[in-house]
Image: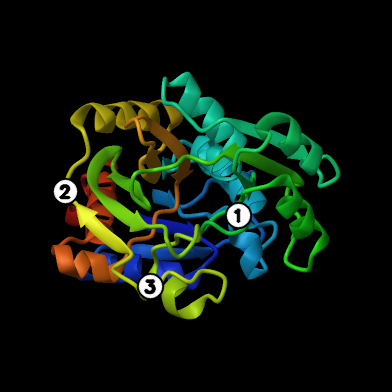
Amino acid sequence: MPSIHVLHENPAWLAPLAEALDRRRLPWRDWFLEGGAFDFSRPPPHGVFFSRMSASSHTRGHRYAPELTGAVLAWLERHGRRVVNGTRALDLEVSKVRQYAALEAAGLATPRTVFVAGAEGLAEAARRHFGGRPFILKPNRGGKGLGVRLFETVEALEAHLAGPDYAPPIDGVHLLQSYIRSPQALITRGEFVGGRFLYAVEVDTTGGFELCPADACAVGDAFCPADAPQRERFTIIDAIEPGLAARYEAFLAAAGIEVAGIEFIRDCEGRVYTYDVNTNSNYNPDAERRAGRSAMDRVAQFLGDELERRYPARDAAD
């Protein structure tokens, strides 16, 4: 029987989607892509395939899960299977540099960024390109906001690089980025399902840049302290400017991305800078309860609709 197949490497992040699919009584299968053998010469099973591979998989001991997923997606697409967030989406998920190139090509402004291979040239690059201005250091392949740090001076960066907390990025590429000052300590994350705007979340950044919204991050991941004590960290809002939402939808369509969170910030003059596209969206359960929303339920509905469109005789055959 054709099913929904969920490709992932983190069972904790799978649970909310599994519950939503089960509530709708949709047939689905769990594809845990940390290992396995696949016969490229044989066709894959029928169904709709949803990739939830994350750029942060290496932080959970799954260093090569994105590469394996890329191979599996190529196999699925070669045989014409319906894939949600396929190879082009994965390519942008694992490289912020490629994200920024695609965003800029779509006319969406990104913060000024300098990418540096290795740690040796980081301090000199920061000195040359940012002078005495504050800047952010982040990995090219990140996820959950891990490794994102704000520095006021080059000397502070040098001390960090020489200290025990520095960890090189998994792909060897660092990003130095302009720090965008916002009138409030907030960023906004627009959530898109089926390529369409669903809702947005205002995120309080006073607790730092590790902004993973999932419940698993808040309680089960020491690297992602999403439970800021001073006020609600995640607050759902129903809308962003219609023009901005439409531009993001056009960007996602061009990039082959159907489910995503897009993060942006406004500076003190009101200019919008987009700095992250997350193709493995997680949703904050407390914020959704307060707002009476469920993005995972909408994802499950979208996947069920796609299964029905691709296999309209499925119910009759059951």
Query: Which one is closest to the eye, mark 2 or mark 3?
Result: 2
Q: Is residue 30 above or below residue 306?
A: below
> Which residue is under mark 3?
215
Query: Picture coordinates of residue 195 (x, y %)?
Result: 30, 37
> Which residue is under mark 2?
238
Q: Are marks 2 and 3 in contact (CB under 8 Å)?
A: no
Q: Quadrant of residue 14?
A: bottom left
Q: Which mark is residue 149?
A: 1
Of the residues under marks 2 and 1, which one precedes in the sequence?
Answer: 1
Q: What residue type is disc 1 on?
A: Arg
Query: Which one is closest to the eye, mark 3 or mark 1?
Result: 1
Instruction: Report how far apart the C-alphas of labels 2 and 1 lie in the structure.
Output: 30 Å
Q: Residue at x 53, y 34 (%)?
A: 99
Q: What residue type is disc 2 on?
A: Asp
Q: Quadrant of residue 17?
A: bottom left
Residue at the front extreme, as displayed: 132
